[in-house]
Amino acid sequence: MSDVPVYMVVNLSAITDKDAYRTYEKGFFPLLKKYGGEFITYDDNSITLEGESPRGGRMVIFRFPSEQAAQDWYADADYQALSEHRRAGTTLDFLTLVHGLPPRD
């Protein structure tokens, strides 16, 4: 299962300090790439078709080549230090890891 990609789905219901969040964004991409991550998309106007909608804000999706890469990224001391800017500048509803499908034979 180690070669199964994983996706991170994030809901930031509010950006409360744009400068702190900008600092986070600037450092985010190099750390994402360090672990083989790939930014997929973000949306400030997502639409919930069924179920309970997140509180709004920004939805972000990115991927890693494996769960281990995602776990290593999240545990990285540099990422944890950088994420303090995200924590200071946003209201985070969730940061969820979703497993992709295994390769088909």
Image (tube, helix red, strand yellow):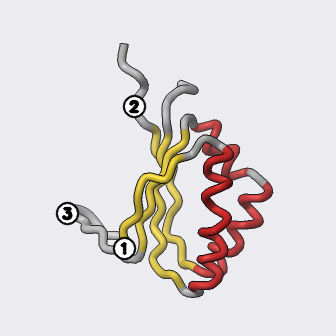
Q: CA distance from mark 2 to mark 3?
A: 23 Å
Front: mark 1 or 2: 1
Local crowd size for mark 3, using a 10 Å CA cut-off: few (<14), some (14–19), many (≥20):
few
**Earlier-in-chain disc, 2 versus 3:** 3
Q: Secondary structure at mark 1?
A: loop
Q: CA distance from mark 1 to mark 3?
A: 16 Å
Amino acid type, label 3: Leu
State the residue position of label 2. 101
Q: Mark number for residue 49? A: 3
| x and y, in percent, of residue 18 in the image | 57, 84
Quarter occupied by residue 27: bottom right
Local crowd size for mark 2, using a 10 Å CA cut-off: few (<14), some (14–19), many (≥20):
few
**Earlier-in-chain disc, 1 versus 3:** 1
Q: How many labels, in total? A: 3
Amino acid type, label 2: Leu
| x and y, in percent, of residue 51 in the image | 25, 63
Q: Secondary structure at mark 2?
A: loop
Residue at the image position 31 percent from the left and 73 percent from the top: 45
Residue at the image position 64 percent from the left and 70 percent from the top: 24
Amino acid type, label 1: Asp
Residues 29 and 63: in front is: 29
Q: Mark number for residue 44? A: 1
Front: mark 1 or 3: 1
Residues 45 and 92: in front is: 45
| x and y, in percent, of residue 32 in the image | 62, 51
Residue at the image position 54 percent from the left and 36 percent from the top: 65
| x and y, in percent, of residue 96 in the image | 50, 54
- Would you say 85 lies left or right of 44 here? right
Q: CA distance from mark 1 to mark 2?
A: 27 Å
Q: Secondary structure at mark 3?
A: loop
Give the farthest residue toward the left.
49
Residue at the image position 60 percent from the left and 69 percent from the top: 25
